[in-house]
Amino acid sequence: MREFIGVGGVALTADEYGSEEHPCVVLLPGLTQTRKVWESAAKALAQAGRYVISLDLRGHGGSDSPKDCNYSLDAFMGDLVAVLAQLESRPVVVGSNFGGWIGLAALGNTSAPIATGLVLTNPPPEFQSLNNKSIAKTVSERASSEDFDQGLFAGGFDFIKLQNKLEPAAKNLKLPTLLVRGIDSQISSSDATQRFAKLIPQAEVSEIEGAGNYVAFDKGDEFSALVLEFLENHVPHQPLQYVSGSDARTLRDAMGCFVTGITVVTTLDDTKKPIGLTVNSFSSVSLDPPLVSICLGNHVGSLDAFRAEKSFGINVLHTGQQSTSNVFASKGVDRFADIDWSTWEQNVPIIEGSLASFECIKKDMIIQGDHTIFIGEVVRAKFEPHRDPLLYFSGKYRRLHFG
């Protein structure tokens, strides 16, 4: 067993299966279900080389019942986000009905990438046509007091709010997603499932014959096989490999595993007009003498200016300067129009308010492959130690998270 801390300090209990060294999968049961419903699936996934966390929702099974009876949508969503933040790697989230809807609502409303995929069973029904109390009564009748806190629906869980969250979350979800429906399900029709899947940019749909509302357990072996196929396609157990002659994209993705900062490098063109572009290939080379390097693609339009000028500037961006990074990565715009900048002794543009700025005299220029490496001697630097850096990892902006 493993314990996590959710919203309001609620202790959430989970079972662990497999080795922590393997890719992670988090299993979420539905309302009035406990983690034990996933036991067979969890064992199958672990045997296939996955590290599985099978979690009890708040007020269910071994997890605590909140003292303030907080069973709001935000609490369930917050619990999941909190659990994922306590894991050592980003998992694929697999949820049965309500568990999957909570997973979708949480992952689709979170800007930070905290998971690598989502599997859910059945899109939600049209809650607008139902009554919260009647839903609560129906669900409550299916469970004994040992399964979950009978106070779960005392405040009336807002299913309408849940449904209103799901469509925008689906449209915003940037993860590979698998929707699995039982052919005999009364929760949603095949057409409704297809319509909902079209909202999700990277969605796949599978249907299982002979399964109903609880497709993950009605046909457990078939469901586990679908999940494993999805995992191997999108989060393979074996690391991706690049060998000479392989797809260059694979090498690029491997390089993207190295976290970098974001800089805007600047100089002047032949008319002394300021130019600059967003670059993340910046590195310290030496302290004595004080040397740094930047690396520019040979396709860059401003490359000739950097080759011709004797000086350049490097501006390391902080978390509040993502828009600056985007501007200097855009084409066809005046990149300096709305940017506060000044010049120092070498007259190259220095962006005001950056995390750090360096003014450099070019000492060497090396053309290698499809890039040109510039070595500069730092003649002046200024930095702000109380800000946090804007990071770039695996093709996306990131921020520091302190635990």
Image (cartoon, grey):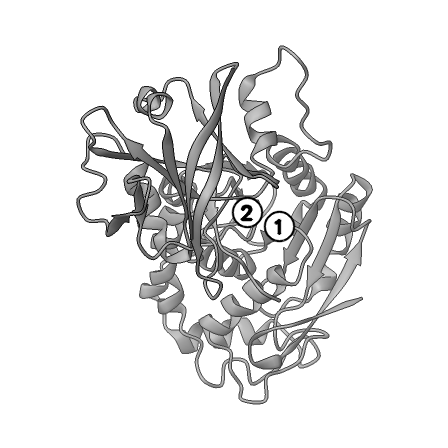
Nearer to me, 246 or 81: 246
Q: Does residue 188 appear to the left or right of 103 in the view shown?
A: left
Do the residues under discs 2 and 1 have CB atoms within 8 angstroms?
A: no
Q: How many marks?
A: 2
Asked which quadrant contains residue 36, the reply is bottom right
Quarter of the image with the N terminus is bottom right
Whole-percent x, y for residue 9 in the image: 61, 80
Residue at disc 2, secondary structure: strand
Residue 388: give its label: none
Mark before the other along the chain sequence, 2 or 1: 1
Q: Does residue 133 appear to the left or right of 341 in the view shown?
A: right
Q: Residue furthest bottom?
A: 67
* Residue 49 vertical position relative to residue 152 in the rendered view, above or below: above
Q: Does residue 260 appear to the left or right of 300 in the view shown?
A: right
Badge 2 amino acid: Leu
Whole-percent x, y for residue 48 in the image: 78, 39
Badge 1 amino acid: Arg
Whole-percent x, y for residue 61 in the image: 70, 73
Binning the other alpha carbons within 10 Å of mark 2 as few (below 14), some (14 to 19) or many (20 upward) gives many
Asked which quadrant contains residue 105, the reply is bottom left
Residue 90: give its label: 1
- Residue that numbered label 2 is attached to: 118
Res 125 seen here? no
Nearer to me, 193 or 305: 305
Quarter of the image with the C terminus is bottom right
Q: Residue furthest top?
A: 245
Nearer to me, 224 or 342: 342
Binning the other alpha carbons within 10 Å of mark 1 as few (below 14), some (14 to 19) or many (20 upward) gives some
Q: Nearer the viewer, mark 2 or mark 1?
A: 1
Instruction: Give me the C-alpha separation between circle 2 and circle 1.
Output: 11 Å
Res 142 seen here? yes
